[in-house]
Structures are given as C-alpha cells and as structure tokens.
Amino acid sequence: MTKINLNDLKILISQGESHTLEFKKSTAKLHPAFKTLCAFLNGDGGIVLIGITDQGEIVGQDVSDSTQQVVAAEISKLEPPAPIAISYLILDNNKQVIVLQAQRGPHAPYVYDGRPYQRDLSTTRMMSQQRYDQLVSKRAQLNYSWERFSSTLSLDYIDRECLISFVESAVKAKRLTSLSLQDSIPLLLKKLGLLKGTTLLNAAIVLFGKDFSFDYPQCQLKLARFKGKDRHEFIDSDLIFGNAFTLLEKGMLFIENHLPVAAKIIPGKLKRVETPLIPYEAIREALINSISHRDYSRHGGSIGIGIYDDRLEISNTGGLQHGISLEMIKSGYSELRNPFIAKIFYMAGYIEMWGRGVPEIISSCLRVGDPEPEFIINDDISFLVKLKFPAELRSVVSLSTAKQEQAEIAWVDSKLKILTKRQREILNILMSVTELSVKQLATRLFNPPTDRTIRSELMYLKKLGLVSYRGKARNIAWFFINSEDR
C-alpha cells in the first residue's frame, strides 16, 4: 500500500468523497469508518481519512496511545483478518490525520462486527444476502472448486454413450490411447480423475451425466431468437437441460438454424454458397468458453444464447476470477475455474491450447471483416460475449455458374438478402414438391420447431416472393414460386 504524505493528502481531499474515498471528522465516527473499510475490502479497496470534515476541511484529530489502541481494537473486528495500513500525518496545529487504507481483499466477503458491508458510489450500506452468498461461494472455490465436490448421484446417472463418444474423440485427438476403449465405465472415470473410490465428483455429472432438472438445475441452456433488437418478442425459444457435450451440440444446432447467412441459391438445384454473418469457429469457441469457465456452484445459473436482428449474445453465470482483468484474457492469459471440465474438453480436441479462447474469438471475427466482439463483465456475477453482425453482408461468389443462370441468381440474390439454415431447409423442401401443409412440412424438417414458428418462417419467405400458399384455414398448402410464375 502507498504511503501518503501531506501533499498527497491535499490532492486526495480535492477529489472529494467517492467509491474509494471517505472522510470522517473524528474518531467519534470510528464505527461507521470501519463499516466503510469493510465495504472497501469487499469491493475495490479504498481510503478512510479521519480528521477531515464532510466538506473536505482538514481539522485533524488528537491522537494518543489510547486512540491507537481503540483503532487496533476495531481492526480486530474485521473477519477474516485483513491487512489495514495505518498512518498518522502530523499537522501544523500538532493534531493528526489518521489514514486507513484497505486493498480489495482476496477472501471476501469480509464482515465488521459480524456484519458485511458494500460500497455503492460514495455510500456504504449493508450487503444483500444474495451478494453475500455469492461471495461465500466464490471464497470456497479459492481452496476447493465446486467441480471437485462429491456428488450424491450414482454411476447410474452417467450417460455411457456420451462417455464412450468422448473416449473415441480423445483417441482420435491422440490424447488417450486406443486401449482406453476397452476400459469399463468406472475405470475410465477413475483415469480421468472423476471418480474417487466409488464416489462421483460434480464434474463427472456436468460432463457425462443425464437427468439434470432436479439435482443439477444449473446444467441448463436458454435459447432464444428475438424479433428485432430487444427482448420484447420471441420468434423461437427453448430451454435445454443436459451435460456439457449435449449443451454444446444443441446450442450450435440452434445457432445454425437461426443465424442469418449471405447465400446464393439456384432455384430447382441444391447448389449454393453460404457465408454466416459470424464465423462458426468464433461462436463455437465462445460457447465452449461459457461451458468451461462458468460458475456451476450457483444452482440458479445457466448459459444463455440470444440471437437478435443485429447481434448474437452468449452469456454465462460467473464473471472473471479474482485478480484477472479483461485485458489479461484478451492477451491470452488463462486461469481455469473448472480445471477438470476444461481438461476433458482439451482431451476431446475442443480446446487446442490454454488461453486461446478469447484471442481466437476476436481474431476469427476480424479475419473476415466482422466487428470486434464486445465482452461485458458484471463483476463475478456474469460474463457476456456480444458478436455484432456486420453492417453489410459479405459478398459471396458462386464457385461454378453457367452464364445462362446469372440472371436468375441475380434475381434471387436481390430478394433473398438473409436466410437462416431453417429457412433454407424449408425452401429446399418446397422446391422438390408440388405443395405441402405446415404439418406435412414439419415431418420433413430435420429438427422441426412448433407449427407457429414454421408459419412465421413461411411468411418471411412469402414476403421475399419465394413461396406462396393456396386454400384457406386448415386447408392451406404452401408451394415454391417458380421463376416463370414471378
């Protein structure tokens, strides 16, 4: 901590009280002064000056041995024990200003006289129960992370097919030998460090478990495609419970179904060239990071994927760990919150090297001319990656196109603008048949959504002039509009 002289003191006072600075006129205000010091320990650190009025006037304080003993006694009321730097600045009138400095504590939450406090702007107040519980959970993870805790579930809750699929991937990535394919489930889990004796660790359930909604409700993925740029109206949404590999697969499938692409389609043929607005490698890296680094100790937590008209957002509960900044992770620094979970992803070939996540997300977007991703961190509560769509779609060049097809492609391009994977799938189905009802169309889709969502997709294609319908009410049938009919 920095030692403060009289000149430093005057500069500090000129700045006024703030999130990290508070004035007290005398030791008569020692009790509220230490509440603020407790709040500083739980926040970003700060300084309390005793002998300064609320208006910033330096009046000083008589300091005796008894005064120093009282200050020391108040420090002992801070738990867990925290280093508070104390200095005494002598003024011309022989009075002194007591300077109390607290840095952000590594073992928050701290309490003073049995109660926790936090700083909001220049005000100190009692910490909320929710915030206190979050900090307690975080402190526990400093010594023993949640993923290492013993699970109450048995081996019956392990998805055998998922575990075997992982082993096959790890063998292919040359991070396990082929002999591992002959191991039993318990032996595999022991080799991976996920089974201690006969007890599964939490990490085993997160990675390879099944049936999550009751015992592990935090193993969930929230999916939404919003209409417009805010959350007022859904086009499609879903809530999925599952292990890490299931959430990754379902999340990418949802994104592929909804992410707009620049595309050229030749009517009546399957040939097309597509470029997603955001590179899939950047999206996949962001989703893997969310799964690997999130805070699983919060049972109400989740991972979220939100797709808007102008951006894609991936969020997770749990911000950066203590002492790590956004600049550090952008430069490639990595400190794993869940080493077991990250190790399994590495062995499966999903993570090539530690610390590449955020730099890879950024470079993948910049390589194709997309805006640089935005990272929004809400203390240790949440982490959000915002992938903005480019202002204009990237040009897509057809690899092989006959001259007589150029006019038709140009017309489709001018109407098509952007289509999602699902819209392209619907269009392709209708191009191969005479007509279909919504329910008939649903049976042909690979991963059919609700009838309402299908109708919404069809109306969008109709607006582009690519499809239309005949009939009324329940007898409506949809069909592709041939070029000669336009």
Image (cartoon, helix red, strand yellow):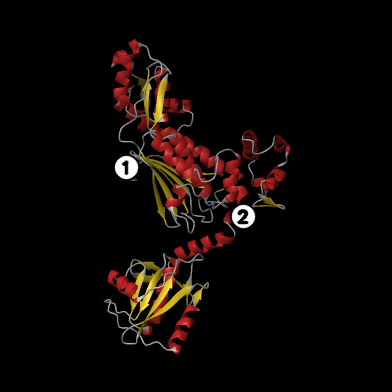
Sequence-wise first label, 2 or 1: 2
Please tell me the numbered disc located at residue 362: none
Q: Nearer the viewer, residue 276 or 53?
A: 53
- Give the amino acid type for the residue marked by disc 1 in the picture: Lys
Determine whether 479 is above or below 371 in the image: above
Residue 234 in picture, x, y percent from top left: 36, 41
Count residues near mark 1 (Cα–Cα under 10 Å), then give few for <14, some for 14-19, many for 20+. Answer: few
| Viewer-closest of 308 and 35 | 35
Q: Position of residue 252 (x, y in %)?
A: 48, 37
Q: Amino acid at mark 2?
A: Arg
Residue 7 in view, yes or no: yes
Element under disc 1? loop
Where's the C terminus, which quadrant?
top left
Q: Quadrant of residue 440?
A: top left
Residue ranking furthest to the top = 404
Question: Which quarter of the figure has residue 438?
Answer: top left
Q: Nearer the viewer, residue 187 or 278?
A: 278
Instruction: List the residue tagged with mark 1.
Output: 229
Seen at 30% across and 83% down, the residue is: 59
Q: Which quadrant of the figure contains the N terminus?
A: bottom left
The residue to which callout 2 is attached is 148
Query: How far from the left and from the top, in percent, is residue 267?
Result: 37, 17
Q: Nearer the viewer, residue 12 or 431?
A: 12
